[in-house]
Image (cartoon, rainbow, N blue to C red):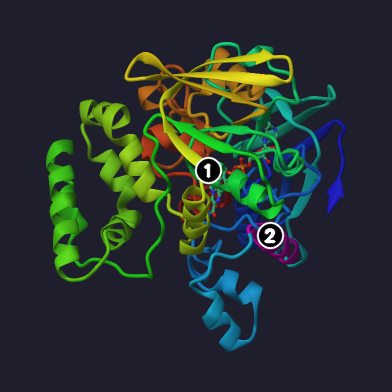
Amino acid sequence: MTSVSAGLAHDIAIIGGGAGGVLTAIQLLRAATAPLRIALYEPQSTLARGVAYATPYPEHLLNVPAQRMSGFSDQPDDFLDFLSADPQERAALAPMFVERHRYGEYLRDRLERARAASPATLVHIVQPVMAMDRNEAGWRLRLADGAQADCDAVVLAVGNRPRPLPARGAGGLSADASLSAWDFDAVRAVPGDARLCIVGSGLSMVDAVLSFVATEHRGAIHVLSRHGWLPQPHAPHAVADFDPARLLSLDLRARLRFVRERVREAAAASLPWQAVMERLRPHGQALWRSLSESDQRRFLRHVVRLWDVHRHRVAISVHEQLQALIDRGQLRMHRGRLDTVMQVGRCVQVGANVRGRPGLALEVDRVVNATGVEMRVPTMRNPLLTELLGEGHARTGPHGIGIDAGDDGRVLDADGRVQPDLWVLGSLRIGNLWESTAIPELRGQAEAVARQLIAR
Ligand SMILES: Cc1cc2nc3c(=O)[nH]c(=O)nc-3n(C[C@H](O)[C@H](O)[C@H](O)COP(=O)(O)OP(=O)(O)OC[C@H]3O[C@@H](n4cnc5c(N)ncnc54)[C@H](O)[C@@H]3O)c2cc1C
């Protein structure tokens, strides 16, 4: 694939070459019946890595079984097809959580194939887009190296950004003392006897702990989060039998009651609670969109952590590893809200509030930020998004999270008017859709956006 950066013109620009951008490019290449100039703007030199698939390390697994990770809804076994041609091996792999880097390899393979068979052309421009303005044709993009590019339509696929460490004093920590759980190499390089405080207890924390297991880390690992819950394990595949549509007309409180009743029924039928979550999983967007605005707000304030810990689960083997570390006293879960971090010599003093009062003090050598995905665009520190909001080309999504878009994925400007030639997909649609980051949602969005673009 060509990598260029110069004065450019394309029919379609896709900004962001993680999984979402690459899936959109594949759909466009496959659907094109005539020459079409597509550009993929991605500063990483390797496509389809983004955050999730950038890890080269074998301990980092997909959190969805291989049989449900196809990039294409009309080819449900496509990821398995990539992994193996042998029927027995495929059957064994189907329920497994395979190494995450395999998924980036898979998407790159499918991109190359689509490109080779398409009348359309694709260029990878190894540059971030810093800003975009309207021109007569559509959009003019401004790149980090000062070059400009004109295009008729734009797809924003800029994905996930890490949340800054939510603590007073965070800016004063040295680079050695503070690291991001998404910096997979830095986590692997932590000295084996370092005392650690991981802030956040979701799947990014799990990634970091698994790397510490892989490097035979000996130092204490403290995990601090507001609820102190450990991620829950998947269960052997089972789906409870009830109609999720019955939830749609209920308010939040009644929904929670309904779900608890289904969990009790499942238990009576010897099914785990995970079977109820599996039944709800494909309906996440409908469940969110049918809540009133005030119930959505209540959900974000009071229920979201309970939901997340049951929704975003880990492989059983991973859960067992975490539990083993807890049992031998190396991993300690703490409940509290991080308040301050202060570097004293080579140590970091961490202070957290428990029930609104100073209640926890830890002295560690490193703080690992595993607080996950930033949902508020103004704090994402992505210059392109800041500019889009500042110029009124876009506005923040419901509840101030993500950016606002119509049902077809087209961005709404500051006055709520549909941008006819600007689409968004992935986690930026969180305010409108809630479930909008994992592959099952991304593949549907990429298909829908490509269909509209080709129809133009
Ligand atoms: C650690 C982790 C593990 C995950 N594991 C799974 C899993 O197992 N299964 C699953 O279904 N989902 C998983 N997810 C969800 C994940 O978000 C999606 O699967 C998917 O990777 C998201 O892809 P994306 O393209 O939307 O975003 P990203 O992967 O974040 O990619 C966005 C890309 O846009 C680029 N970009 C940003 N701004 C600009 C700009 N201004 N100009 C040009 N380029 C720009 C970035 O460099 C980046 O490469 C995981 C997420 C994380 C964070």
* Secondary structure that dominates the magenta span: helix
- Where on the picture, by quarter, is residue 134? top right
Give, as a three-letter code, the residue at label 1. Answer: Leu
Rounded to the nearest angstrom, the CA distance separating label 2 from label 1 is 21 Å
- Mark 2 and mark 1 lie on one chain; the one further toward the N terminus is 2
Q: Position of residue 429 (x, y in %)?
A: 45, 36
* Left or right of 100 on screen, residue 258: left
- Is 131 colored magenta in this rendering? no
Q: Which mark is residue 158?
A: none
Q: Residue 417 or 423: which is nearer the viewer?
A: 423
Q: Residue 369 or 340: which is nearer the viewer?
A: 340
* Viewer-nearest of discs 2 and 1: 1
- Where on the picture, by quarter, is residue 146? top right
Residue 133 visible here: no
* Left or right of 234 on screen, residue 261: left
Q: Position of residue 212 (x, y in %)?
A: 66, 47
Which element type, helix, strand or loop, lies under badge 2? loop
Q: Position of residue 29 (x, y in %)?
A: 67, 58
- Where on the picture, by quarter, is residue 145? top right
Q: Residue 144 or 85: which is nearer the viewer?
A: 85
Q: Position of residue 263 (x, y in %)?
A: 19, 57
Mark 2, Cα crowd under 10 Å, few <14 / some 14-19 / many 20+, is: some
Vertical placement of residue 401 versus 339, above or below: below
* Residue carrying label 1: 331
* Residue carrying label 2: 58
Residues in magenta, as a range: 100-113
Rendering quadrant holding ligand 1: top right
Mark 1, Cα crowd under 10 Å, few <14 / some 14-19 / many 20+, is: many
